[in-house]
Image (cartoon, helix red, strand yellow):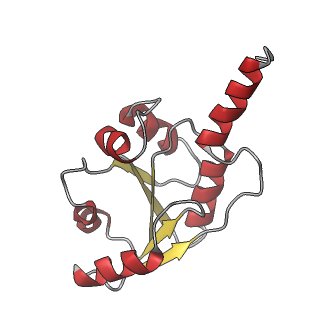
């Protein structure tokens, strides 16, 4: 069985998230998704709109997903979760700001050099990201179209 790992915030689930997870699942047999810990989201991005427990529950309800876990808080090394999941492949979203070569090097340095890192294709839609959706809502609110 080929195990795939996908990671993300998954705040305000949208079609881009579903597409990412469908693409990730197509790389193997079992897809485990790591939903970012609330403190990690706060540190690296923004205040989450939905909390990690709700995000975990929402992602778990998506058809391509076999298992979901909440990621480590920011004070715990991100790679510490790998022994629990045992992935063969880490699938990165098209817009995730991770450099594949840096991840491969870090995996190798930590004894996980056999894990492949693959960037999946994006969705060709103008509302494929949480920030884009929020911006559209704000634009419409300013024009009293909401």
Residue 51: image location, x then y, percent: 39, 31
Q: Nearer the viewer, residue 75 or 10?
A: 75
Residue 139: image location, x then y, percent: 73, 27
Total labels: the figure holds 0
Residue at 31%, 78% in the rendered image? 107
Residue at 38%, 77% in the rendered image? 102
Q: Nearer the viewer, residue 51 or 30?
A: 51
Residue located farthest toward the front when viewing the structure as drawn: 142
Residue 81: image location, x then y, percent: 26, 61
Residue 128: image location, x then y, percent: 68, 48
Residue at 47%, 55% in the rendered image? 66
Image height of 99 relative to 139, above or below? below
Q: Name the quadrant of the N terminus.
A: bottom left
- Left or right of 115 on screen, residue 119: right
Image height of 137 relative to 74, above or below? above
Residue at 79%, 18% in the rendered image? 143
Image height of 4 relative to 130, above or below? below
Q: Nearer the viewer, residue 99 or 91?
A: 99
- Left or right of 74 on screen, residue 11: right
């Amino acid at each position: 069985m080929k195990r795939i790992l996908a990671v993300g915030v998954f705040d305000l689930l949208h079609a881009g998230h579903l597409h990412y997870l469908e693409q990730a699942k197509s790389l193997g047999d079992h897809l485990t998704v790591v939903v970012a810990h609330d403190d990690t989201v706060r540190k690296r991005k923004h205040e989450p709109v939905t909390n990690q427990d709700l995000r975990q529950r929402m992602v778990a309800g998506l058809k391509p997903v076999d298992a979901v876990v909440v990621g480590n808080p920011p004070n715990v090394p991100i790679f510490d979760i790998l022994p629990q999941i045992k992935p063969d492949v880490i699938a990165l979203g098209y817009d995730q700001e991770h450099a594949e070569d840096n991840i491969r090097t870090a995996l190798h340095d930590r004894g996980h050099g056999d894990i492949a890192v693959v960037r999946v294709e994006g969705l060709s839609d103008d509302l494929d990201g949480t920030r884009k959706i929020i911006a559209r809502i704000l634009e419409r609110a300013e024009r009293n179209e909401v």
